[in-house]
Amino acid sequence: MRVFTRVTHTILFLVLTVAWPHAYAAQKPAANPDAQVLQDFKARVDKYVELRNKADNDAPPMKKTDDSVALRSAQQGLAERIGAARTPAKQGDIFTPEITARFRKLLRPEVNEPGTKATIKDDNPGAIPFKVNGPYPSKEPLSTVPPNVLASLPPLPKDIEYRFVSKHLILRDARANLIIDYIPNALS
Amino acid sequence: MHSRSHTRFVIALALLVGAVGAPAAQDVSLPNQPDSLKFAIIGDSGTGSSSQYKVAEQLIAARAKFPYEFVLMMGDNLYSGNGPKDYQKKFEEPYKALLDSGLKFYAALGNHDNTDERNYKPFNMGGQRYYTFKPKNGVRVFALDSNYMDQPQLQWLEKELTASGSDWKIAFFHHPLYSSGGTHGSDFQLRAQLEPMFLKHGVDAVFSGHEHFYERIKPQKGIYYFTSGGAAKLRDGDVKKTDLTAKSFDAGYHFMLIEITKDTMYFQAISDQGKVVDSGALTRFSDQEKKKLATPSS
């Protein structure tokens, strides 16, 4: 009888040990949707960086030089290789509607901080024509992105940056001087 | 007779051309000590305009009297494009005499600069948006990219300031933390990020541009601040003097000369007319004084 009780307890313990985590998992709510959206953003940016790295490897490395002609042609060459590899690229490839909505939510409290809008406006090039997969207009200034805004947005890999053009938030490849994607009227 | 008057005429003409062509006389009155660190500052210089060339002439002339070892550029090094012609017209030509002599320029990026300028060798940025160098024992200089003060840059600065054992810590970047400019004014967001770090690690002096005038700010919590963004651009009358202003000049273009020896920093701001618009000697605050000044009074 004692032996029977011990066996019963052991079986019960084993059943609980194996079954409990599954039962718990089934009840656990789905992962944070906001986190999933930001994870998706990261994956899309990483994919772009992978593509850029490949485009970068297809040419001699960009070196420090006093030859301004070489500097310009290296940057343009990289932009052309990326542009060709991404064709057809369009607005929303990275900033999907879900990611855009999340970014707007992140930006809202920051741009309402005193002085933030003024800083963004200060160096903003204003309403200039630009397009995805095209160069950032070389004669135009780059908007300063206030540190509090940068701290609120997801971090980016090296040489990928957020900038503002008028009220639009753009994602810019600083190495290729290329506009990767943008959120229209992100500051509205 | 005819020949003599002709010679006189030629000499007079040569003197006249010399007087017009040469930059106006300067009153460079820094100590010019043999073992000191000497450097110059230009800000918002890259327009390619006659004003830039005029200031460049003054800068070149100053070196004959005051042999500065390098030039710090406060950003907006190339306005309206960074094609080969821009580098030529807005940097290589105006400063040719200095570049030919082997003088080094160290640039910070402004909002009108393409990030790619970091790869342009004569800007000595080492391919980076932000960097540091030690021009002399006891002095360390930090160049920052104030257009894009992201977390990696802030972490880098914290690490570099912690590691710096130098007596003099000098930072330079485009946007001024303190300014009485009517057009831009102080950058409060940037100040919120940088000032605590500067205070924690005992930064002594900060130089910026962006505002197209000269302003020396009264010491803030033991740090000296200068705005020098008028080496080619000018916002005439833009200084709205506040309690911050120690001295300002917004009626002409300018550049600066700096000399550091032991605990003293001597400075002069010189206009495109060769006129000294500000000068003085500032003593570095001791660590103890800085700590006291950094702590808000209860």
Image (cartoon, coloured by chain):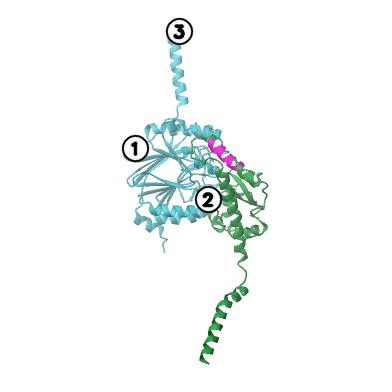
Q: Residues within 10 Å of mark 3 (few under 14, many from 20)?
A: few
Q: Quadrant of residue B200?
A: bottom left
Name the kind of residue labelled 3 in the image.
Answer: His
Are discs 3 and 2 both within one chain?
no
- Report the residue marked by disc 3: B2
Quarter containing the N terminus of chain B:
top left
What's the residue at 59%, 60% (across, down)?
A39
Labels 1, 2: front one:
2
Magenta segment: A70-80
- Report the residue marked by disc 1: B32
Residue A167 visible within the image: no
Chain bearing tag 2 is A
Please name the predominant secondary structure of the magenta segment in the image: helix
* Residue situated in front as seen by the camera: B286 or B216: B286
x and y, in percent, of residue B131 in the image: 45, 47
User: Magenta includes A75?
Assistant: yes
Chain bearing tag 1 is B
The alpha-carbon separation of the residues under discs 1 and 3 comes to 49 Å
x and y, in percent, of residue A54 in the image: 57, 46
Furthest residue toward top? B1
What's the residue at 34%, 57% (across, down)?
B288
Name the kind of residue labelled 1 in the image.
Answer: Asn
Vertical side of B207 occupied by B55: above or below: above
Quarter containing the C terminus of chain B:
bottom left
Q: Colour of chain B?
A: cyan
The mark found on residue A158 in the picture is: 2
* Residue situated in front as seen by the camera: A149 or B250: A149
Q: Residues within 10 Å of mark 1 (few under 14, many from 20)?
A: some
Q: Tell me the SS state at disc 2.
A: loop
